[in-house]
Amino acid sequence: MTKISDNETSDELIHQILALLDREGVGFEITDPNNNGKYLYVNETAAKQSGLSQDQMLSLSVPDVNPEWSAEKYNALMQELLRSEHRNFQIKTVHQLNPSDPKISLLINGYLETDSEDHPKRLLALTQNISELTEAQQLLAEQKEKLEEIVIKRTAEVHALLQIKEQFIANLSHEIRTPLHAILAMTESLENEHIDLKTKAKTTLIKKNSESLLHLLDSLLDASKLGANKLVLNPKEIHLRSTLQSIFDEDAILAQKKNLILTINNNVSSDLYAKADESRVRQILKNIFGNAVKFTERGSIDISLNATINHKDGNPYVLLEISITDTGIGMEAQYLNHIFDRFSQADSSISRNYEGSGLGLSISKDLAELMNGAITVSSTLNKGSTFNVILNLPLTTITHAMKINGHALIVDDIEVNRLVAYELTCQLGMEATKIASGMEAIELAQKETFDVILMDIQMPIVDGIQASKLIRDLESLNSKPRTPIIAVTAHNTDKDKEECFSVGMDYYLPKPFNLNDLYKAFVACGLSEK
């Protein structure tokens, strides 16, 4: 067997690689970085990409072949590669030797080879014709742009139609309300006069049907606004227990008229106040309770009211859960997925036997979702239904009857501020230690264990920001449990809040604050109630 030398093996391998590159349509070129990119070698593919022969290219440099690359641009690339940690690069360029030649897009992957003293030796580059890919990408971008224009146009048309629909319903509502108002007013006037029983029955029927029409108009208007995302809630502080109780007490007579047993288990604490649109809460619950009465001929309706306090992003809110269970006609499982669709009722016989537009549950569901809640239903045909309403309402007030477990460290350089915070903390049933400087807070936080720290921000020498950062650093260094820190300050800008949270503080309590504010801050920091 004839032995092949290492050089022969290496040369053969190089020829194989170059042949493979030509076969795959990949150009290979070597240029001199010390001579403005003079071509030292080009394969057949690279020459074809340039529109020249291999011999022609070997007498030229990069700027001669590619007008887009001047000598200055080529040399600047060499300097940039020498400064970089990695000497490789990838660029896209458009090649056109003569104005009459077609433009081709090239993807160039190169590597700058240097000598032992890190001087540029030669530049090796692989070139690929990506014209078809570029054209495809350009076509795709154009199609995407056209599609976006169509979507924008169609969206605008839909919005315009929704506005027309909303305006039409609003106008219709106004045009019907005006004569309807006259009918109701005259009916009430007749009822107050001395009329016989037969006429009384007629006026009662007129009034009942007029009120039904008015309710339908209101439902259509609400459905239109909800569909266009234009219904705006008007939240105000409400006392939860009494508000909920009054909603069902008002309509209890409806159940009594049908001799239904009505049970209301109101487990909502009398201490809770929340921010909610009371009229919309009433609308949701009256719709569902009204349906329970309507579809229950005998038996009972059981109502359960519960409220728990939760926290999200440091803010306390009330999770309100209302369950209304009846022993009415119920529904088959196949109808449950559509029960909240607009103008939907379980089946056609329902609309024939019971009054209703099929809008009430749909509107109630949308309103519940506006209050970060939901409505779910379970039902068995001929046995009854249970509707569960969940509403998440911002907590506004809790009475001083609420108590907190724990030991608080109060840090403030002003004595009267320390005294106020101390008194309020003690009113909540907590232990409290008060000190006058940030440095004392850092030392005491290492020696003793506290459940929470009330940290004033504006203090001399070591302020609250610096003290909090050092406390966090020392906790991490000594593997100590993390103590919640509440920032207490008269400043109340977003920038101030961001600075406090950036050093690891947990809650932001602006001055002046009251007992309820302090309670919410403690609860938000995870302290438990007594």
Image: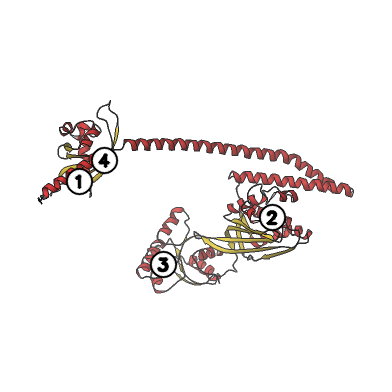
Which of the two discs, 2 and 3, labels the residue nearer the N terminus? Answer: 2
Query: Residue at the spot x=23%, y=36% of the render?
Result: 45
N-terminal label among 2 and 1? 1
Lower position in the chain sequence, tag 2 or tag 4: 4
Q: Is residue 78 visible?
A: no
In the image, is residue 132 above or below residue 385? above
Q: Nearer the viewer, mark 2 or mark 3?
A: 2
Q: CA distance from mark 1 to mark 4?
A: 31 Å
Label 1 to label 3: alpha-carbon separation: 56 Å
* Vertical arrangement, residue 110 with respect to residue 302, above or below: above
Q: Secondary structure at mark 1?
A: helix
Q: Which residue matches tag 2?
A: 286
* Label 3 Cα crowd, 10 Å radius (few <14 / some 14-19 / many 20+): many
Q: Position of residue 209 (x, y in %)?
A: 77, 46
- Write down the residue under mark 1: 82
Residue 158 horizontal side relative to residue 283, left or right? left
Residue nearest the viewer, comparing 138 with 417:
138
At label 2, the amino acid type is: Lys
Residue assigned mark 3: 437
As shown in the figure, which amino acid type bears the numbered disc 3? Ser
Whole-percent x and y of residue 267?
Answer: 64, 66
4 or 3: tag closer to the N-terminus: 4
Q: Which residue is mark 4?
A: 24
Disc 4 + disc 3, Cβ < 8 Å: no
